[in-house]
Amino acid sequence: MRVAVFSDIHGKILLPFKLVDLYQKETGNKIDFILQCGDMGAYPNIENLDKATIKHAQHDRDELGFHDDFTKINQNIKVFLDELNINMICVRGNHEDHDFLDNLEKESSDKSIFPIDVYERVFVCRSGLEQKLETEDEVLNFVGIGRIGDRKGRTENRFIQDYERKEIKKLLKTKNSFDILLTHDKDDSQSGYGMAEIREVLDHVIFHYHFYGHTGEPFKQETDFNGITQSIKVKELEFNESGILEKGCMVILTKENGELSIEIVDQKLTNKMTKFNWKLQ
């Protein structure tokens, strides 16, 4: 099983799918799923944009990609996604229409993940629940924790909610181990910011890998303070001033015969998708 991991796509919903298509064609290696570390930019209604997204969207229409391309059928996109036949499973970030996502989550209260787009290719996973992805040969076990933490007691819906904390408390009691912890925020142990619940989970539950985004830091791989988990900051999927994607914006996790390994996709491949041509490819 191969899974492509991205973070912070900010409306460029189609770009991870296009990069996966390119990767498959260039390498001959099949990708089974996409995982995404939040800040999808899932805004179906432009009037609900937050201030940061409004500011960026004035200069970059890509910020509105969910609204433009994933709320109503575009036949070309539908054909592409159907042929690719890969789903993207996301956690929430802080730059989303959380009222929209909250309503979908309530409507799908019996499911651990739920679709949010018109093609049913983009899914959001509920925070703190045990998740499973399966192929014929492998099973990938993971947990997602969305939104961001807060030290000031704020409760607006970009911050972790009490019902999610309750699910995380249940998770702390599990005897199961997992392949992946997928979060938007980082843990708060050293930085003075982040999400305390992530630290608690990493200290009580065994994960082989922790993928996160949000912080704006470069790609980084290090052993977590628990001495077990490989902690990976996935570089935000943003084009730099030269119009190219930064190192570490696309990570491939492979599970074969129960063993996990990762590949940082070379920029020679990602450089073929630039700010100026990616929509045309």
Image (cartoon, rainbow, N blue to C red):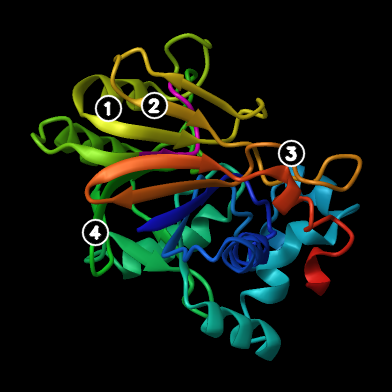
Callout 4 environment at 10 Å: few (<14), some (14 to 19), or many (20+)? Answer: some
Picture layout, residue 209 above or below residue 107:
above
Say left or right for 219 vs 126. right
Q: Earlier in the sequence, mark 2 or mark 4?
A: 4
Identify the residue at image location x=65%, y=60%. 19
186 magenta-colored: yes
Q: Earlier in the sequence, mark 3 or mark 2?
A: 2
Q: Is residue 38 visible?
A: no
Where in the figure is residue 13, as x and y percent of width and height?
63, 63
- Marks 3 and 4 sit apart, C-alpha to C-alpha, by 31 Å
What residue is pinned by disc 4?
Answer: 138
Callout 2 environment at 10 Å: few (<14), some (14 to 19), or many (20+)? Answer: some
The three-letter amino acid code for the residue at tag 1 is Val
Tags 2 and 1 touching, CB below 8 Å: no
Q: Secondary structure at mark 4?
A: loop
The three-letter amino acid code for the residue at tag 3 is Glu
Q: Earlier in the sequence, mark 3 or mark 1?
A: 1
Identify the residue at image location x=39%, y=40%. 261
Q: Earlier in the sequence, mark 4 or mark 1?
A: 4
Callout 3 environment at 10 Å: few (<14), some (14 to 19), or many (20+)? Answer: some
Q: Which mark is residue 201?
A: 1
Picture layout, residue 20 above or below residue 215:
below
The magenta-colored residue range is 181-187
Q: Which mark is residue 275?
A: none
Where in the figure is residue 106, as x and y percent of width and height?
33, 63
- Marks 2 and 4 sit apart, C-alpha to C-alpha, by 21 Å
Tags 4 and 1 touching, CB below 8 Å: no
What residue is pinned by disc 2?
Answer: 230
Where in the figure is residue 222, as x and y percent of width and height?
46, 19
The three-letter amino acid code for the residue at tag 2 is Gln
Say left or right for 37 vs 223. right
What residue is pinned by disc 3?
Answer: 246
